[in-house]
Amino acid sequence: MLDNNAMWPPIEPWQVGIRGRCPRCGEGRLFNGFLKLASNCESCGLDYSFADPADGPAFFVICFGCVPSVLFAVWAETTFQPSIWFHILVSLPIVLLTCIPLLRPLKGWLVASQFHHKAEEGKLVRQGE
């Protein structure tokens, strides 16, 4: 279990993030469930407590997945006025398929990007300190 990040070659965040792998070694699992982050990497021991993607993945999924699929359903309703079965059999699966599968890879990418860019919470620096 090494703590020195300099011993690990940098890995592009998208390469490990979308696969749900450790941002330092690329081997260990990042998730301990569908969206729950593991506490640390089982391969290199990296502590994942630095990771805080907050609502970032949900925001991107809503903007680029949910909004277009809901707009499709609204367009279909206003243009063709289909039965409720159209929305149950077509619109609902489209909405679910454009939203749920994207959450995990986006969360992994954001966590890996936080590690790669050494992102942390902003701090107010006062003069004289």
Image: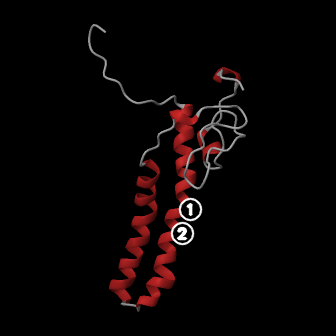
Are there few (<14), some (14-19), or many (20+) residues within 10 Å of tag 2?
some
Q: Is residue 39 left or right of residue 67?
A: right
* 62 in relation to 118, above or below: below
Check the picture and name the quadrant holding the C terminus: top left
Q: Is residue 12 left or right of residue 91?
A: right
Report the residue marked by disc 1: 101
Rendered location of residue 12, percent (x, y):
62, 37
- The amino acid marked with disc number 1 is Pro
Direction left: furthest residue: 127
Circle 2: element type: helix
Are there few (<14), some (14-19), or many (20+) residues within 10 Å of tag 1?
few
- The amino acid marked with disc number 2 is Leu
Circle 1: element type: helix
Between the residue at mark 2 and the residue at mark 1, the CA separation in whole angstroms equals: 6 Å
Rendered location of residue 50, percent (x, y):
51, 33
x 56%, y 62%: residue = 101
* 105 in relation to 27, above or below: below
Direction top: furthest residue: 128
Direction bottom: furthest residue: 83
x 70%, y 22%: residue = 7
Q: Is residue 50 left or right of residue 25?
A: left
x 57%, y 39%: residue = 112
Rendered location of residue 9, percent (x, y):
69, 28
Report the residue marked by disc 2: 97
Report which quarter residue 121 is drawn in: top left
Contact between marks 2 and 1 (CB within 8 A): the answer is yes
Check the picture and name the quadrant holding the N terminus: top right
Report which quarter residue 79 is drawn in: bottom left
Q: Which mark is residue 17?
A: none
Q: Is residue 56 left or right of residue 124?
A: right
